[in-house]
Amino acid sequence: MNGLWTQLEPLLAKVAKPARYIGLEDGAQRPDHDPRKVAWLLAYPDTYEIGLPNQGLQILYELLNEHPDAVAERTYAPWVDLESELRARNMPLFSLDTHRRAGEFDVIGFNLSAELTYTNLLNMVDLAGVPVRTADRRPEHPLVAAGGHCTYNPEPIADFLDFVVLGDGEEIVAEITEVILDWKSSGRTEGSREGVLRALAGITGVYVPSLYDVAYDGERLVAVTPRYADVPELVEKRTLPDLADWPYPKNQLVPLTEVVHDRLNVEVFRGCTRGCRFCQAGMITRPVRERPAAQVRDMVERGLRRTGYDEVALTSLSTADFSGIEGLVGDIVQSTEDGPPVSVSLPSLRVDAFGVGIATQLQRARRTGLTFAPEAGTWRMRQVINKLIREEDLYSAVDAAYANGWRRMKLYFLTGLPTETDEDTLGIAELARNCVELGKAHTKSPSVTVSVGGFVPKPFTPFQWFGQNTVEELRRKVNLLRDATRKAHGVQMKWHDPKATLVEGIMSRGDRRLGPVIEEVWRRGGTFQEWSERFDLDLWVEVMAAHGLSPDWYAHRHRTEDEVLPWDHLSAGLHKDFLWQDWRDSLAEVGLPDCRWTPCYDCGACTGYSIEHIVASATPPAGGSQGTGQDLSSSSVPVELLSRRPVVAGTGGGAPPS
C-alpha cells in the first residue's frame, strides 16, 4: 500500500463498513503513474456497494489502463462516518486502488445515473480539495467530468462540470486522453485551462458548459448558445457502431464485501427499439447493437471460470429480445452442467418475449426470482405509454414461469403516467391478483411482489413535455393500490417515495438556475439524498424558495411545443419532431410497433451509422400486440387529456385468466 493508506488504515476501525475502502478486489489494477500519462480517477457518486457493479465504470477502467498514455483508478462516495473522520483530519478523497489523493489526478470523471446523487458529486469534488465551481478552478486542479444517462440534461450541474460526455464512452476516452496529454505536456500554464476546454469541445460527444451562454426571458429559457465560432451549436452523442470490437469488461471486479448485483454481468446488446415512451434509456441508446452470440458465450465461460460466481446476468434493456436467446441460455446452462449449479438471470424481461422455451432453458439452471415489467395496469394505459403487451401476454409468461418451477416473481409498474385514471391504477392490483391465481395451479404458495414507482418525465422521450403528478396525487394512488391489495393473499406491495420523485423530476428537466440550489442543499448537509433515511424534501423546497424558484413550475407544468428545453442544444440522435409526434400519438392512445418489424419511423437514431436496424430474426416475436401509427392533424395538445381524472374507480386489467 502507498498514498494515504497509512493514515487511512487506523480510521477503518471507526466506520461501519471498512471493506468499502480497502480495494484489492479480484480484477483490481495497481497502475504505475507517470508524468507522461493522463491519470483518470473514475468516480461513482454513491457508496461502494452501489457503485462497484456499474459496468460502464468498469469498462472505462480497463480500457484506460490498456491505453499507453493513460492510467485509471476508482473511487466511490465515502459514507458519512468516514467523511466525518476525513474532514476532522483534513484528509482528502482518495483512490481505491493505490489510495492516492484525488487532487493528484488529471481528470475526475463521474458516472451519473441518478439525479439525487448530484449533491454527492459536489461533496466528492470538495473532499478532493478542488473548488466545486469550474469558474474557480486553476490549471493545477483536475478537470471534473461526467457521463451517464443524467448528462443528457446536465444543465442543473453545468456550473460544476468542466466537460460532459454524451453517449458511449469506449472510443471517446482515448480522444479525450490525447487532448489532455497535450495540455499536460505543455505545462498547464496560467490561462491554459480554457484552451484545453476549447480543444475538448471539438471532440464529437463532448459538451463544455462554460463555453455556452444561457439567456432567459422572465421564467422561460430563451436560448443556450456557444460563445465562440469553433464551438458546436448542437453537441451530438457518441455511438459505438459494433459491440463485437469491445468485449469488455474482460476482468470484472469481484468485491471483498457484499454489493448489489453481486454476479457476473455480460452485456448482450445495447439500445432498444420497443419505443416505450417513458423510457429514456431506450430512446438515448438507440440503435440496437447486438453482441455476437459466440462472443457472449465466451465472455460468460471465461468470466465464470475466473470469478467463481455461480450466477450470470445477461444484461440489456430487453434481454429476451436478443436473437436466439433460447439457444444462448441453453448453451450456457449446458456448458456449466459439469460444475456447481449456475443461475442464469435475464434482467429487463419483456413478458411478450418470455415463453415456455426460455422458461424451460432457465429451469435447467438454479432458479432465482423473475421480474416482469408490465408498467401499467390496463391495455389502454399501455397503448398510451407504448408498452404493447396485453394481459394474455403477461398471464402466458407468468404461467410458463410457475409451470417450470418458479414460486415468486416481481411485477414492476409506474403510476402518475399521462392520462392515467383510477381504473388504470386499480388495474395493477387486478393483474397481481390474477397472477397469484395462476400460480395456485402449480404451487401452494405463489408470491407476487408489486413494485410501484412514481413516473418522472425524462429528456429525449415523448413524455418530456408532460407535467408530472404532485406528491399528493402520487400518494393518493399508492394508497388506492394499498387498499386494493391489502387482503390479497400472496400479493405484496412496495413503492418509491413520492417526495423523492418530486426532486428527481425537478432535476431531470431543470436548467442552470438550479445549480445554486444544489450547492446550498449540499452545504447544508444534504448528501446521500438517494437514501431514504437521509432524503429531506423540506430542505429542497426551502432552498428553492430562498432562490425564488418554484418546484411546481419545474415539475408539474406541462411544456408546449415551442418552448425551448434546457437540453435542446444537445442531441441524443432523435429528431425533436419525431418525439413530439409520438407524444401526440400517446394522447390519442395510438401504439407504434417495434421498428425492427415495420418501416422506419425516421426517429433519427440510425442516421450516419450504416447500421441495419433489423438485428433479430426475420419475423417478430410471438405475442405482443402491435398498434397502428396514426397522423394527427392538430398540432396542439388537448389539455383535457393531460388532466383527465376519473369519476368512478374501476378494476381494469382485463378478464381474469381461465
Image (cartoon, rainbow, N blue to C red):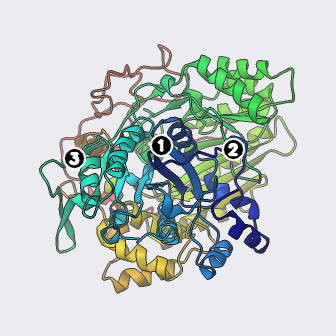
Left or right side of 53 for 635:
left
Question: Mark 1 belongs to which amino acid?
Answer: Ala
393 above or below 61?
above
Q: Quadrant of the C terminus?
A: top right
Disc number placed over residue 434 in the picture, else none: 2
Residue at figure coordinates x 80%, y 44% from the top left: 446
Provide residue 376's location: percent of width, then percent of height. 53, 48
Provide residue 39's location: percent of width, then percent of height. 48, 50
Q: Which residue occupies the foreground of this view, 479 or 115?
A: 115
Q: What residue is pinned by disc 3? A: 234
Q: Which residue occupies the foreground of this view, 167 or 565?
A: 167
Left or right side of 164 for 481:
right
* Mark whose residue sits in front, 3 or 2: 3
Provide residue 414's location: percent of width, then percent of height. 53, 53
Disc number placed over residue 86 in the picture, else none: none
**Which element is circle 2 on?**
helix
| Mark pair 2, 1: CA separation | 56 Å
**Which element is circle 3 on?**
loop
Question: Mark 2 belongs to which amino acid?
Answer: Asn
